[in-house]
Amino acid sequence: MKKYLIIGASAFVLGAGSMAYVNSAVQAAAQPKARTYQMLELFGDVLDTVERQYVTPPDEKKLIEAALQGMVSSLDPHSDYLTPDSFDDMQDTTRGEYGGLGLEISSEEGVIKVVSPIDGTPAQKAGVQPGDYITAVNGTSVLGLSVNDAVKQMRGPAGEAVTITIARDKTDPFDLKLTREVIKPKSVTARMEGDYGYVRLSGFNEKATDEVSAAIKDLQTKNPNMKGLVFDLRNNPGGLLDQAVGVSDLFLDGGEVVSQRGREARDIERYNARPGDITRGLPMTVLVNTGSASAAEIVAGALQDRKRASIVGLTSFGKGSVQTVIPLRGGADGALKLTTARYYTPSGRSIQKTGIEPDLEVAQTRDQAQDIANRAYMTEASFRNALDSQDGKERRGVHEPAEAPPQGFDEKKDFQLSRALDVLKYGSVEATPKLPKPPAKIAEVIAKATPATKAPTPVTK
């Protein structure tokens, strides 16, 4: 009995002390909330003042939507508030059919940039390139617009003409007149390159895994002695996570594909492949470049880490964050597209900002090799508010690439593809004879040889 009383007394003393601690903790926790309420009151005051004193009567709904978009998009380049119409457009895109030009775009500080044109679409046929800036649509400036608002300007009924103004490095701004089409991007193309199969995947919509599987089976049926496979993910802007896992699963005989890790240490989700490799272990190379992003990087990273394929080309875009789409009131009030986690390859590498570095770095043209030696391409690391790589690594800066087409190579041909085929023929990157490093002139050398001039900024021309 005495023992229990001592424990009870001790508990009373600890309880008294802990109550004081809890009270102080509650007060500390209440302070940030108080600041939040103050800022919400400020927001209400600003909205009221705008409604009463702006030169023309404003649209209250648009004001609130713009405020929501500004708040969420300030977090990182991929978080956003989607209006009901934008939410519907996004669902059309992931289903693989919509009316538009066929562009994957992003925004940094109100500047619309092309991540990648989609194969076979009006934009790709007209020659729009990754890294281009879109400054106007039908003569109306899109500078300062959100991605969703810019998309609205470009999408619409099929058959209508749309003129976009392009600003591109080293050129004056120019107009491209395109005709909207019902975009049904054929995600997969396949053919034989000699004894080797070639499969290109242009995006990860809901049909990606099934289409890649069907294309490979068709190649195998028609070419039972196929010796290997080149899987082309260049300029693939990504898409659905489950499709990235599904496509990786085709080539892996079980094991981890990717993991995603959220804010809390316990917020880890792992995605694994099932037993069975559709190619039955055929040698593989994967082609990537700076336009390969998100789901494309998940696949390339998984196949690289698992020693299933050699990666050839250029370091990928570096989008290694997970966006969760959260419908608001069932989608009636739109949705939040919110960054909730980072992707990690099977070996634990963060894709974010750094991208997937190839096992054999190959520039597509001699001009591209020169560019890589002198300027940074538009990548995830270009965004000022991009989420950091959790492991603290930084993307490789300007440098002379390992390989580029030698003198005499017909640059109308696909040099990166030819080197991917060489890796298959020789059995590995290590066994593939290396070409002389391209003699790219780096910026320091050029600066000494020419007078210093300030390069024009494309978006201000």
Image (cartoon, rainbow, N blue to C red):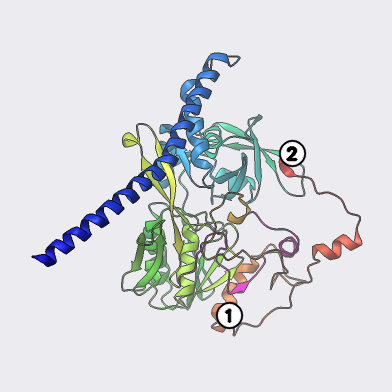
Q: Which residues are magenta?
A: 349-378
Label 2 close to label 1 by CB (< 8 Å): no
Q: Inspect the magenta stretch and tell me whether residue 289 lies in it.
A: no
**Rendering quarter of residue 275:** bottom left
374 falls in the magenta region: yes
Residue at numbered disc 1: 429
Checking the image for residue 460, the label placed there is 2
Q: CA distance from mark 2 to mark 1?
A: 43 Å
Instruction: Report the magenta stretch's main SS.
Output: loop
Q: Could you tell me the amino acid type at mark 1?
A: Val
Secondary structure under badge 1? loop
Q: Position of residue 410 (x, y in %)?
A: 72, 67
SS under mark 2: helix
Q: 205 left or right of 71?
A: left
Task: In the displayed orientation, state which residue is furthest to the left.
Answer: 1
Point out residue 212 in the picture as x, y percentages from the top left corner.
41, 62
Q: Amino acid at mark 2?
A: Thr
Which one is nearer the viewer's eye here, 243 or 180?
243
Q: Is residue 108 above or below residue 448?
A: above
* Picture layout, residue 230 above or below residue 118: below
Residue drawn at x 76%, y 63% is 370
